[in-house]
């Protein structure tokens, strides 16, 4: 895009310089004819040439104005495209940082979930052993109650970690969909 703009700009600049040279040459010819006409006011040929030169000067001035306006439009278009590209780069960078953060959270949640699962399984085994060994002693009942509370607590922790993991996975999926949709549209 910049190469095309530079080429258009170079072409327009060259055209402007040529038009300025042509305009200067025509204005000189106009001045010469005007001076000759003043010297020979009655000569119709000089008047025709003077009018022709005057029309040519006006045509060249108009072409020069058009070329300048075209160059200005090209500059404005390039600025708009550059601004749009910078905005897109900023958005992509922000999305990449958010994705990295979510990935880190997912890894932490998975590690916590694994820890909760191991603890829960350990409490479950201890509880089963106590039920098997369960006798009538009060101490055994207290140990059983403590283990059951610990088991429930571990199970609740496991459930909470699974819920957080599900939310983080969903958020990561939504972010990837959004990022994919916006990156492919640019």
Image: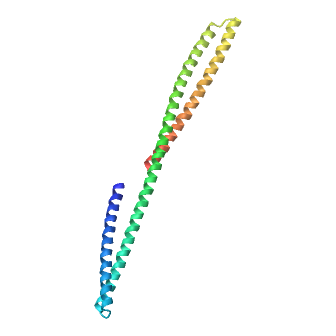
**160 vs 63, nearest the viewer:** 63
Total numbered circles: 0
Q: Residue at x 32, y 92 (%)?
A: 41
Whether residue 124 is situated above or below residue 47 in the rendered picture: above
Nearer-the-camera pick, 38 or 85: 38
Q: Quadrant of residue 50?
A: bottom left
Quarter residue 17 falls in: bottom left
| Residue 1 in view of the camera | no
* Residue 65 image offset from top left, x and y in percent: 39, 71
Relative height, residue 89 to residue 30 (above, below): above
Most extreme residue toward the left is: 45
Residue with the most extreme front position: 39
Q: Residue furthest bottom?
A: 42
Q: x%, y% of residue 178?
A: 50, 44
Please name whichever residue, 170 or 45, is drawn nearer the observer in this view of the structure. Answer: 45
Q: Tell me where residue 151 appears, x and y as whole percent.
A: 62, 18
Residue closest to the eye, 19 or 129: 19
Which residue sits at x=54%, y=19%? 118
Q: In the image, is residue 27 above or below residue 132?
A: below
Split into 4 quadrants, where in the image is the N terminus?
A: bottom left
């Amino acid at each position: 895009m910049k190469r095309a703009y530079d080429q258009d700009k170079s072409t327009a600049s060259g055209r402007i310089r040529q038009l300025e040279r042509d305009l200067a040459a025509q204005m000189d010819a106009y001045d010469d004819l005007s001076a000759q006409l003043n010297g020979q006011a009655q000569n119709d040929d000089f008047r025709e040439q003077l009018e022709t030169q005057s029309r040519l000067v006006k045509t060249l001035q108009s072409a020069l104005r058009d070329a300048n306006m075209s160059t200005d439009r090209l500059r404005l278009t390039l600025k708009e495209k550059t601004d749009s590209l910078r905005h897109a780069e900023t958005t992509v960078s922000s999305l990449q940082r958010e994705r990295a953060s979510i990935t880190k959270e997912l890894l932490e949640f998975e590690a916590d979930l694994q820890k909760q699962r191991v603890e829960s399984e350990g409490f479950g085994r201890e509880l089963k052993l106590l039920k098997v060994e369960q006798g009538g002693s009060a101490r055994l009942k207290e140990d059983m109650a403590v283990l059951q509370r610990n088991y429930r607590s571990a199970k609740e922790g496991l459930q909470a970690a699974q819920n957080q993991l599900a939310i983080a996975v969903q958020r990561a999926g939504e972010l990837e969909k959004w990022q994919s949709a916006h990156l492919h549209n640019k």
